[in-house]
Image (cartoon, rainbow, N blue to C red):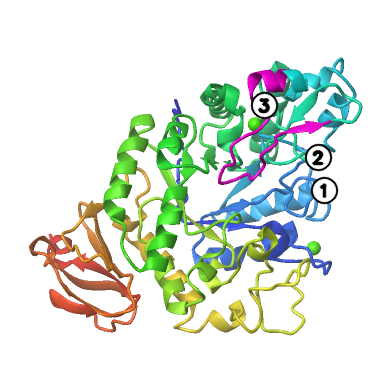
Amino acid sequence: MITDHPEKIPGVCYEIFVRSFCDSNGDGIGDINGIISKLDYLADLGIEAIWLTPIHPSPSYHKYDVIDFYEVDPEYGSLDDFRELLRQAHQRNIAVYLDLIVNHISTLHPWFVEASKGPDNPYREFFWWMTPEKIEAMGIEKRETSADSDEVYPWHENPGDEELFYGMFWKGMPDLNYDSENLRFELSKIIYFWLIDIGVDGFRLDAARHIYPPWVEFNNQNFWWYFDYFVRNIKPEAYTVGEIWATTEEVAPYFKNLNAAFNFDLSFALQRMLINEKNEDLTAKLIASYTLFEKYNPRFMDAIMLTNHDQSRIGSVVGGNPEKIKLAASILLTLPGQPYIYYGEEIGMLGMKPDPNIREPFMWSERFADPEKTNWIDPVFSTAETVVPLSRQQHHPDSVFTHYKSLIALRKSQPALSRILHPNIEEVSITDNRLLAFLRDDPQHPVLVIHNLSETAVSITLPEKETGFTTVLFATNIPSERIEKQFVLPAWSSIVLASQDRISK
Ligand SMILES: [Ca+2]
Ligand SMILES: [Ca+2]
């Protein structure tokens, strides 16, 4: 059980797909120095923590198949660059989380190069090896596809070898086998290196539900107990957030040993609600999920997002409609938990799968040859014709960017909105399913939030209990400072209201 937590929990987090964010040296590939040059931008936006997708040497463009856990890929910079990033991020009170991939490595990693030499190699035990006969006898030739892997046949040939190796994502990524004490020791050295020697603030943990394969899945929690035990011993305040791409019920037990976990059910519910323009009883579902999470860890942190680097971008999910892009942001940034903004969301970037097209270059400026813009891929969705670059949004009062910035500032200014531990959300008796309405309670400054999901204006009468909420803290399309208990909320609009009564007490 987790005993300690970060002293100051970052509220608004930001996921950076490093390759596409900002190029500092003109090679067209995003890099660490590029991120350093944008720390002021992120601080100005109100970001309190950044999660970097993997930075270690790797043969792939996304770098989720690691060759060396102790280095930075030269494409992205050096360890010294990374130390400088940490130093400058911390100066601005921005925490830095590394994407740590403990489930698998690249076949080019020395551990696998060694292990593939044969059954007698000392590194053999770092992986899962089995003869075809045993695999067949156990009935594990095939796996059921999951949200995060289409792989059906997870056993792969090692040329000249009688045994196959297990790689649930694909044959270039062999799964690691943590039954090996030597491997656990190697992992503890890696954790120590990054948390203590380098000084990162925490880890985003890739594929956390897949550490042990299906036939020994029950060992997963034991592994995370071990992981957490080690982390807490060397850096009690470190932050851990797990990618458990599964239902709320499957996510919940992971809170025993991780501070936070991404809420995929919420992500998909929000996307459906924005597409269908109908509430799916979201508040009640969230409260039920909190009750479940709390059983495993009363200090759980709900890591919430619209989409991440594995999902089609929210801008495209809502058909590129700028009003709905803003509505999506309004919902995310008024819900409890830790919002993770995926880079480019704040300027309304677009993108649909396949993966490279949801990871297109960030659009910094309108200059034809923007030296900061990465060009490792020709963008298909986020182009000069479809997305207004940041430079033209930054000082525009109606831009998506200004909308994000205002909402982040609002969230940080209101204790009722920024609560992370013991999330505060309550239902209100506004039952029109075109609306998403909820109360964020607080002893001094409770806040009432109403979103209109639909394409038509909706007339609202505040319920008896909420008639005190007449002061407008934030609104899309409603200019007045104060409203009556009856008002009309325009299409795809949001309003955040404070209670005059309770504030004056
Ligand atoms: Ca570069
Ligand atoms: Ca695994």
Residue at which label 2 appears: 67
Label 1 packing within 10 angstroms: few (<14), some (14-19), many (20+): some
Q: CA separation, marks 3 and 1?
A: 24 Å
Which quadrant is home to the C terminus? Answer: bottom left
Mark linked to residue 258: none
Of mark 1 and mark 2, the one earlier in the sequence is 1
Of mark 2 and mark 3, the one earlier in the sequence is 2
Q: What residue type is labelled 1?
A: Pro
Front position among marks 2 and 3: 2
What segment is highlighted magenta in the picture?
134-157
User: Residue 467, located in which quarter of the rendered image?
Assistant: bottom left
Question: In the current view of this chain or complex, which residue is farthest to the left?
Answer: 464
Q: Pointer 1 and pointer 2: residues touching (CB < 8 Å)?
A: yes
From this view, report whether residue 300 is shown above or below residue 275: above
User: Residue 217, located in which quarter of the rendered image?
Assistant: top right
Q: CA separation, marks 2 and 3?
A: 17 Å
Residue at which label 1 appears: 59
**Dot 3: element:** helix
Residue at which label 3 appears: 188
Q: Which residue is drawn at 87% across and 15% down?
A: 120
Find residue 87 and report its horizontal and vertical position in percent.
65, 51
Q: Residue at x 66, y 62 (%)?
A: 359
Q: CA separation, marks 1 and 2?
A: 8 Å
From this view, report whether residue 148 is shown above or below residue 355: above
**Dot 2: element:** loop
Q: In this view, does 354 lie to the left or right of 313?
A: right
In the image, is the residue at mark 1 within 8 Å of ligand 1 by its beta carbon?
no
Q: State ligand 2's quadrant.
A: top right
Label 2 packing within 10 angstroms: few (<14), some (14-19), many (20+): many
From this view, report whether residue 116 is shown above or below residue 46: above
